[in-house]
Image (tube, rainbow, N blue to C red):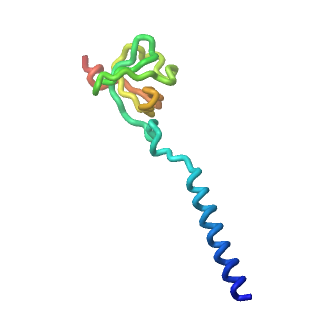
Amino acid sequence: MKKLMIVTFALALVMSAVAVAQYSAQQPDNSKSGTSMKAVSVTGKISDDGKTFVSDKDSKNWTISNPDAVKGHEGHHVTLQAHVDVDKNEVNVVSLKMAKDSMQK
């Protein structure tokens, strides 16, 4: 009887370990995503059509995924707070303000 209880307990322990391993294997790993979780600050110029953004830092072209957020700032030099998706080469604009150096000109 004692042997049966020990075997049952060991089996239950093994089964719970397997269940935990399967559960953790199914969790998505957001750290490998190309999208930044925090909004980052980038300075550059918005295209005349408002659909792309050129970064001052590396002159890289980014597609603006929400062009309505930059409406009225087409062709301007701005600082964006945006979520950057490196894989898709996109920025999702959270907010924007005119860049400081363009106000002084």
Residue sitting nearer the eye, 102 or 13? 13
Q: Residue furthest bottom?
A: 2
Quarter of the image for residue 75 reads top left
> Residue at (47%, 29%) from the top-left corner?
92
> Residue at (50%, 47%) from the top-left corner?
29
Residue 88, position in %: x, y?
Answer: 46, 28
* Quarter containing the C terminus: top left
Q: Report the side of 13 relative to 52 (left or right).
A: right
Residue 38, position in %: x, y?
Answer: 44, 41
Q: Residue furthest top?
A: 48
Residue sitting nearer the eye, 55 or 19? 19
Asked if 77 appears above or below 42 in the picture, the reply is above
> Residue at (69%, 86%) from the top-left corner?
3
Quarter of the image for residue 13 reads bottom right
> Residue at (28%, 26%) from the top-left corner?
58
Q: Report the side of 72 relative to 13 (left or right).
A: left
* Quarter containing the N terminus: bottom right
Q: Report the side of 105 relative to 88 (left or right).
A: left
Residue sitting nearer the eye, 36 or 2? 2
Asked if 23 appears above or below 89 in the picture, the reply is below
Residue sitting nearer the eye, 101 or 86? 86
Q: Residue furthest right?
A: 1
Quarter of the image for residue 98 reads top left
Residue 6, position in %: x, y?
Answer: 67, 82
Residue 44, position in %: x, y?
Answer: 33, 23
Asked if 30 appears above or below 71 in the picture, the reply is below
